[in-house]
Amino acid sequence: MNPIVEQEERTPKQIFHHWLEIVILAILFALILRAYVFQGYKIPTIAMENTLFKGDYAIGEKITYKIRKPKRGEIVVFRYPLNPDKIFIKRCVGVAGDTVVVRDKVLYINGNAVPDYPGVKYTDPELLSAIYSSRDNCGPIIVPYGYIFVMGDNRDKSSDSRFWGSLPLKNVDSRLLFIYFSLEPDNYTLEKKSIFNIIRVILHKIVTFPIRIRWHRIGKFI
């Protein structure tokens, strides 16, 4: 016969402490994952279309770039050099030692034209002279050691290394992996600030939420 093991009946206070410990450990674990392994990002602009759309939510991982440097073609998340409080997401197109040139919107690395990556697009047919803007014509720029050269996939609507220079590797936080959620932006706004209008906007967002989900983008690897 199996021996009968008596279990001490726990008080409500002990039960509360038990669950409090579990919650605290879960929060600490989540914070450690966020700080050192994974982090979620919301895409707030159109600068990376058609690879990333405004309203996409993506997961980035932080381990790879602690082991090696970013490679050409990878989507990197970084702190904007001119304002480290801002998070930017761009594509790495050049690494240390590369000579980068943009001529009439065409990207050249070390003298060779680079075919557009899937998702790259141009929205303005006009070619801007380097005298007025570095958008369509810039370089040659030699990427220094400890830096990379980044560009947005929406080439005519992106603030990137063409304008503010090569990106220090110390500013790079993570490599983007996949989209875990996507929501079509809602431009429905308040006409006047009143209780009625606030309630109307809240109801509108609740009702339209399911139809604004971009189901086809969820789970898409980048």
Image: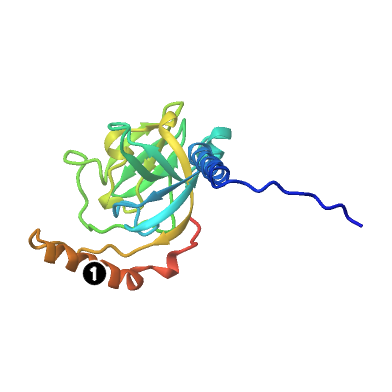
**Farthest left residue in view:** 192
Q: Residue at x 28, y 62 (%)?
A: 185
User: Which percent across, then down, holds residue 124?
Assistant: 22, 57
The quarter of the picture where the N terminus appears is bottom right
Amino acid type at circle 1 is Leu
Q: Is residue 116 visible?
A: no
User: Which percent across, then down, holds residue 32?
Assistant: 52, 37
Res 211 quadrant in image: bottom left
The way the protein has been coloured in the rendering is: rainbow
Dot 1 surroundings within 10 Å: few (below 14), some, or many (20 or more)?
few
Q: Residue at x 55, y 33 (%)?
A: 66
Note whether 208 is above or below 40 in the view shown: below
**Farthest top residue in view:** 145
196 and 65: which is toward the camera: 196
Note whether 65 is above or below 183 in the view shown: above
Note whether 144 is above or below 103 in the view shown: above
Q: Quick check: 159 left or right of 108?
A: left
User: Which percent across, then down, holds residue 84?
Assistant: 32, 32
Label count reads 1
User: Which percent across, then down, holds residue 206?
Assistant: 29, 68
130 and 21: which is toward the camera: 21
17 and 150: which is toward the camera: 17
102 and 77: which is toward the camera: 77
Secondary structure, mark 1, is: helix
Res 49 quadrant in image: bottom left
Res 126 quadrant in image: bottom left
Q: Is residue 42 visible?
A: yes
Q: Residue at x 87, y 52 (%)?
A: 3
Q: Which residue is mark 1?
A: 203
